[in-house]
Image (tube, rainbow, N blue to C red):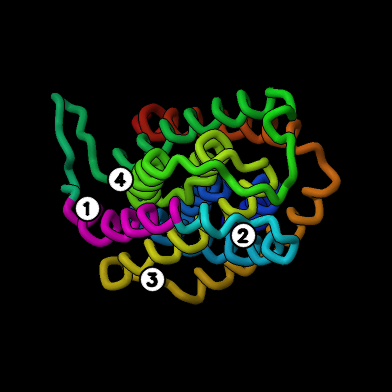
Amino acid sequence: MEALGYFSAILIGLSLGMIGGGGSILTVPVLVYLMGTSPVLATAYSLFIVGASSLIGAGTYMRQKLVSYRTAIVFGIPSTLTVFITRKWVVPVIPDQVFAMGDFIMTKDLAIMLLFAIIMILASFSMIRSGRKSDANQAGSEEQEPDFKYLKITIDGIVVGFFTGLVGAGGGFLIIPALVLLAGLPMKLAVGTSLLIISVKSLFGFLGDLGNQPIDWMFLMIFSALAIVGIFVGGILNRRVSGTKLKVGFGYFVLVMALFVISKELLIDKI
C-alpha cells in the first residue's frame, strides 16, 4: 500500500502540472488510506506537498509570462492570511467529538473527511461542467490583464482560504473558476496564477501547523520530491493533451474518489 501511495505522489504532481489544480483532492485520501496518516496530520502534510509542488509549477508558468501578479496579490493576500488563521487557531480548537446522536458519533477526523468529500463532489461537478463548455471563455491573449472586481475576488479569496485551511486542500478547483469569471483571466493565465497563489497560501498555512502537529520531515520531503517529478511531467503533457478532455476526465475521477471516501467512512469501516 505504501508503494502505491508513493506512486500516487507522482499522480498528484501530474494533476497540478496539467490542469493547475486537483492535487490536494488526491493528497489527503492518499495519505490517509494508503500511507496510514491521521486525517488532521494529512491535511497539514497536504499543504506542504501541494505548496512545494505548485511553487515549482508556478516557476514554469512565470518563465512563459503566464502569471498575473496583480491578481495573485489581490486574491492571495486575504486567502493566505485566512489559511494561516484557520490552521493556527480554528483547527486546534475543534473538539475530538464534534457531536453524538444515539450510537452515531461525529469525530473530528470523520467530520474533516466528510467535509473533504463534499468539497470533492462540488469540485468534480465544477470541473466537468467547465470542461464541457466551449473554448469561447478562453479567447483572447494569454497575457491579458484582468478587469478586476476587487471586492468579489477578495471575498472569494477568504472563502477559499478558510476551506484550504480546514481540509488541507490547495483550492485550485475553486481558484481557477474565480480567476476566469471574476478576474477575466484566460485559462492558461488563470492556471499559472492559481499555482502561484496555491504555493504561497499552502506553504504559509503549513507554518500554522508547526508546533501543533508532529511532522515527519523525511517522509514529507520524499513524498514532495515525487510530486515535483510529477508536476514536471504534467507540464510537458499539458502542451500535448486537450485541456478540456483532461478536465472532464479528472472531474469524473474526483467524483468516484469522493463517493469512495463517503462509503469508507460511513459504511465500510462500520461493517
Q: Of the numbered discs in the image, which one, if any, rests on residue 6? A: 2
Q: Which residue is mark 1?
A: 90
Q: Amino acid at mark 3?
A: Ile
Q: Which residue is mark 4?
A: 109
Q: CA distance from mark 3 to mark 2?
A: 18 Å
Residue 26 percent location from the top left of the image:
55, 46
Residue 97 percent location from the top left of the image:
17, 42
Q: Is residue 84 magenta?
A: yes
Q: Amino acid at mark 2?
A: Tyr
Q: Residues within 10 Å of mark 3 (few under 14, many from 20)?
A: some
Q: CA distance from mark 3 to mark 1?
A: 19 Å
Labels 3 and 1 touching (C-beta < 8 A): no
Image: 192 above or below 60: above
Q: Residues within 10 Å of mark 1 (few under 14, many from 20)?
A: some
Q: Nearer the viewer, residue 18 or 11?
A: 18
Q: Amino acid at mark 1?
A: Val
Residue farthest bottom in this picture: 218
